[in-house]
Amino acid sequence: MWADSHCHVPYEGVDVTAVDEALAAGVGRLVSVGTDAAQSAAAIALAGSRPEVWATVGLHPHDAQVGVGTLDPLLSPPGARVVGIGECGLDYHYDHSPRELQREAFAAQVHLAHRHHLTLVIHTRQAWDDTFGILGAEGVPERTVFHCFTGGPDEARRALDLGAWLSFSGIVSFKGAGEVREAARLCPPDRLLVETDSPYLAPVPYRGQPNRPAWVVAVGSAVAEARGEPVAAVEEATWAATAAAFGLSA
């Protein structure tokens, strides 16, 4: 089956029926990702009610000014269905939070991943050098995922050299995303993940619509085309890699 390594359910028009829809499409694992305390709590609640879903707890760089301390009640201690910290990182494209606060919040969440032995889920946009710099200063958690990978081969190699997983979204299917497809080609199969980031970044042929976890199948098909591999090979590899990246036992 397929695994959606990064989605936001429930969130902005994507409700819990998306899980049933995903299962019907052959998607048997979903990681619902937190972006602030409220969304993280919603992800945890969903994971507690559905065996196909796991949750992360995180503070998106857009909301860095809120403070990482808002996550503490959800991590005291984290429940068994919480498998990651994030998404967290740096977004210098939008700069919705001051960059210094973004860097502080990212470093604090790297620390949380170490402290709780959870996977770190990274969001980085136009901030590669600072992202790698903070990871170098704080230490790379044993399990680290670069979500919605938007870099090219150079950034992919830097991330892989740290032992990280690369997660590819619907962007890999976009006409102008040649460098992302190059990164997907060079990624070892045991470090390869696919995601929807739903409700964002719907893949071809669904562009312009709110994304759905069920459509990770289209993302995987685009990755397979980029790699020149059978779709079934990408399905099998990403299923196993998602389990390894998030320490899933089922």
Image (spheres, rainbow, N blue to C red):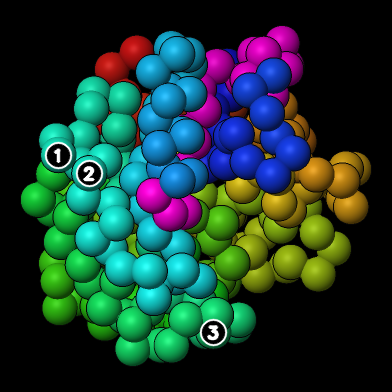
Helix, strand or loop at disc 3? loop
- Residue at x 26% of width, y 41% of height: 74
Q: Nearer the viewer, residue 159 or 130?
A: 130
Which amino acid type corresponds to the residue marked 3 in the rendered image?
Asp
Which amino acid type corresponds to the residue marked 2 in the rendered image?
Pro
What number is the disc on residue 76?
1
Vertical order, 95 against 80 (above or below)? below
What number is the disc on residue 73?
2
Residue mark closest to the camera, 3 vs 2: 2
Lower sequence index among marks 3 and 2 = 2
Mark 3–mark 1 CB contact (< 8 Å): no
Instruction: Check if residue 163 falls in the magenta segment.
Output: no
Vertical order, 28 against 129 (above or below)? above
Instruction: Check if residue 25 falls in the magenta segment.
Output: yes
> Residue 36: percent from the left, percent from the top?
43, 54
Q: Nearer the viewer, residue 202 or 100?
A: 100
Helix, strand or loop at disc 2? helix
Q: CA distance from mark 1 to mark 2?
A: 6 Å
> Residue 62: percent from the left, percent from the top?
50, 71
Q: Residues within 10 Å of mark 3 (few under 14, many from 20)?
A: some
Q: Residues within 10 Å of mark 2 (few under 14, many from 20)?
A: few
Magenta stretch: give its range.
18-37
Mark 1–mark 2 CB contact (< 8 Å): yes
> Residue 154: percent from the left, percent from the top?
47, 76
Q: Give the labeled residue for mark 3.
A: 95
- Residue at x 43% of width, y 88% of height: 98
- Residue at x 51% of width, y 49% of height: 167
Q: CA distance from mark 3 to mark 1?
A: 30 Å
